[in-house]
Amino acid sequence: MTAAPEQIDVLDEAREQVLERGVGLSQEQVLKVLELPDDRIPELLELAHQVRERWCGPEVEVEGIVSLKTGGCPEDCHFCSQSGQFPSPVRSAWLDIPGLVRAARQTRETGATEFCIVAAVRGPDKRLLSQVRDGIKAIREDGNDIQIACSLGMLTQEQVDELVAMGVHRYNHNLETARSHFPNVVTTHSWEERWDTLKMIRDAGMEVCCGGIIGMGESLEQRAEFAVQLAELEPDEVPLNFLIPNPGTPYENYPVVEGAEALRTVGAFRLALPRTILRFAGGRELTFGDLGAKQGMLGGINAIIVGNYLTNLGRPAQQDLDMLEELSMPIKALSQTL
Ligand code: SF4
């Protein structure tokens, strides 16, 4: 009788493939990582941290985010409290240009290099684009050199070109979840429509920021599928969110992703995406608390948003900046990103 071939440990494989050669894990390998037992999480996080140091460097990118238009979105993304289709308590509101300039200045003062202007829309109309244009002009006239990103939903080629002309250097558009799970999360537009916008952004030379939300009823297989679909896109940045079960949304009773599972996910995504900026986005306070946030920073994350998220309060900026100092992680300076 011949002995069964010995199973190669996925973290040993990752050490050689991802750490040494910079090649992200395959879907099958990511799944194995997501299935690792809890007692192997410290080893996973250590490896993920080494991978991020080796392929991205020690700096952490600090970013600010502001909502130019909040709530009242016609789409039905089931996790989103800004959808006008659910009875969530978020009201539709616009921020004026002086408010935008103030937010950008406060963000820059934290040492952040990136300021993302967000609107809750299917895609921008003429009014929104002209607000963005005027806003960017006013931020520059204020003497603020922060890099500007936008997140304004799905775009046409003409709108992509307009944003490039305005000097927007990065665009956020999340795929949110695996292609196979997307129809369970959104019915008013398709994963492919989002993908098409991302391709146009990439082809126009803007940086691509694309991530999603963990904990929306997807299986571990679908989490692995999502990680490799993101890797195929080769995004410059991946914001990783954990579901906040917002009141009034269809997911209001979904359980919060628990800490160990979230850390395994952070590690697995880093091993699938060795070179990307991996950002802790919404939901981390709920999932991790203070201690876990540090573990995540030591487990492959290299960007954070300071201050408030869009509709859920994040932690005060100073607390995050103190955490980076405590961890001896340098903040990426603007000159390094140009
Ligand atoms: S398109 Fe954006 S703002 Fe609108 S419901 Fe979906 S996630 Fe929310």
Image (spheres, grey):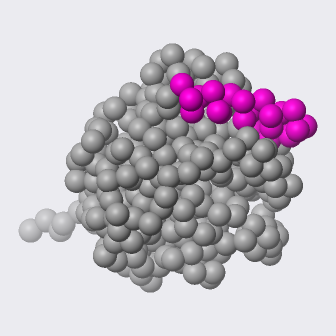
Residue sitting at 67 percent across and 72 percent down?
315
Residue 253 image offset from top left, x and y in percent = 31, 76
Pick the front one: 130 or 171: 130
Is 47 drawn above or below residue 222 in the view shown?
A: below
Pick the front one: 197 or 276: 197
Left or right position of 302 against 171: right
Which secondary structure dominates the residues rendered in magenta?
Answer: helix
Identify the residue at the far left of this view: 1
Left or right position of 163 against 230: right
Residue sitting at 90 percent across and 37 percent down?
143
Pick the front one: 241 or 126: 126
Q: Is residue 114 visible?
A: no
Left or right position of 109 against 65: right
Is 254 drawn above or below residue 200 in the view shown?
A: below
Range drawn in magenta: 126-147
Residue sitting at 44 percent across and 55 percent down?
82
Q: Is residue 260 magenta?
A: no
Residue 336 image offset from top left, x and y in percent = 82, 40
Residue 273 image offset from top left, x and y in percent = 50, 48
Q: Is residue 128 magenta?
A: yes
Q: Is residue 118 visible?
A: yes
Pick the front one: 252 or 243: 252
Residue 167 image offset from top left, x and y in percent = 71, 26
Residue sitting at 60 percent across and 38 percent down?
150
Identify the residue at the far right of this view: 143
Quarter of the N terminus within the rendering: bottom left
